[in-house]
Image (cartoon, helix red, strand yellow):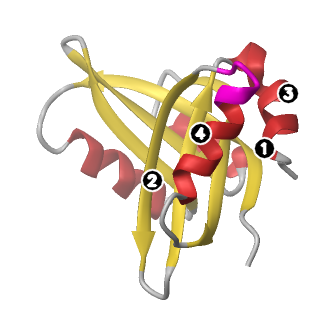
Amino acid sequence: MADSIRIAQYFYVETPHQPGVGAAMLATLRDAGVNLLAFSGFPSGRKAQIDFVPENAETFRAAAKAAKWKLVGPKKVFLISGADRPGAVAEIMTRLAQSKINVTAIDAVCATGGSFGAILWVEQRDVAKAAKALGAA
């Protein structure tokens, strides 16, 4: 199975870095019927940054507006999936390195059934060049 690499929209919210904030945000989206393709959270100074990759941007925006979240975005991110194998992510990173594209961040995981997935960020100015290097659909 060939890797699937596509560009998706993501949004982020800066929140207090406190227990339960992410859970409450995810519950808000669940209750609004928002399906997420990816979700990532990490500390950013004294706050946290929560990244959301919604299946439907308009449904997500409506839920975020109702919750009075201060959204940043949309921005572009790469969603990658494929058959798990040694070096799967190394192949992706090598293609970007050969094209002189710096990776801002990447999170990759393996899943049951022998597959892997990743979410990969580059500078927004590099999205088109990275898409070409990766053969993104």
Disc sitting over residue 128 in the figure: 3
Tell me if I can see residue 127 in this picture.
Answer: yes
Label 4 near label 3: C-beta < 8 Å?
A: no
Q: Residue furthest left?
A: 19
Which amino acid type corresponds to the residue marked 1 in the rendered image? Answer: Leu
Which amino acid type corresponds to the residue marked 3 in the rendered image? Answer: Ala
Q: Give the range drawn in magenta.
A: 97-101
Q: In this view, does 85 lie above or below 38?
A: below
Which tag is nearer the camera, tag 4 or tag 2?
4
SS type, badge 1: helix
Q: Label 1 vs label 3: CA separation?
A: 10 Å
Label 4 near label 1: C-beta < 8 Å?
A: no
Disc sitting over residue 93 in the figure: 4
Disc sitting over residue 66 in the figure: none
Which tag is nearer the camera, tag 2 or tag 1?
1
What's the residue at 67%, 43% (across, down)? 78
User: Residue 85, image x and y in percent?
Assistant: 52, 71
Residue marked by disc 2:
108
